[in-house]
Image (cartoon, rainbow, N blue to C red):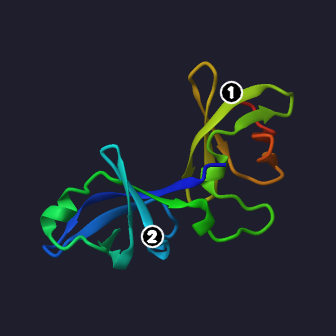
Amino acid sequence: MPQRIEIGEISGVHGVRGWVKIYSYTQPRENVLRYSPWRIRHRGEEHVMKVMEGRRQGKTVVARLQGIETREQAEALRGARIGIERSQLLPLAEGEYYWADLIGLEVIDSGGRNLGKVTNLMETGANDVLIVRGQDGREILIPWIRQRVIQEVDLAAGVIRVDWDPDY
């Protein structure tokens, strides 16, 4: 499992006092503010930055970071990836997973056929969906429906077993 988890990116600036706009990967969006410090990776460098304050601002999240006082300093962070250490994540209940832990796992169907690797997940409202890239480069979308479709998740083995026809 990755030790550094990406939770968002700095997408712009907010105001003139050094606040940044955040594109959050967390649900709900403002949960990105629960984690501090952030490991900001930008232009090949990584800096640890403490979140001083933040809030949801319409459809985005804005934050003030320690040491960032001007619009110019904030603008220099545009495009930076926001990461945290795995140890900062809250523990999950049995059978729950962070998306970051599922990305990269092999997906095997009930017939033993390797369907590919999980490249991402998406939220659809009804249920989450695994995005799996097959060995032929084709994307397969598999709904995250426990027991009916998702049969087993074995993080140690790096495998998700599914009851799913890739031609569906």
Quadrant that contains the C terminus: top right
Query: Which percent across, then down, holds residue 111?
Result: 86, 28
Is 36 in front, or is 128?
Answer: 36
Residue 141 lies, in percent from the top left, at 62, 39
**Left/right of residue 138 with respect to residue 147 in the rendered view:** left
Residue 73, by quadrant, is bottom left
Q: CA distance from mark 2 to mark 1?
A: 44 Å
Image height of 139 relative to 142, above or below: above
**Which amino acid, by three-letter code, is at mark 1?**
Asp
| Circle 2 Cα neighbour tier, 10 Å, few/some/many (<14 / 14–19 / ≥20) | many
Q: Which mark is residue 37?
A: 2
Q: Which comes sooner in the sequence, label 2 or label 1?
A: 2
> Is 100 left, or right, of 75 in this rendering?
right
Q: Residues within 10 Å of mark 1 (few under 14, many from 20)?
A: few
Residue that appears at 72% across and 35% down: 106
Element assignment for label 1: loop
Give the residue drawn at x 19%, y 74%.
69
Q: Amino acid at mark 2?
A: Pro
Q: Callout 2: helix, strand or loop? A: loop
Looking at the picture, tell me which residue is in the foreground, 82 or 108. 82
Of residues 121 and 49, the one nearer the viewer is: 49
Q: Which residue is mark 1?
A: 167
Query: What residue sits 69% from the left and 39% below the top?
Result: 105
- The furthest residue to the top: 136
Point out the residue furthest to the right here: 111
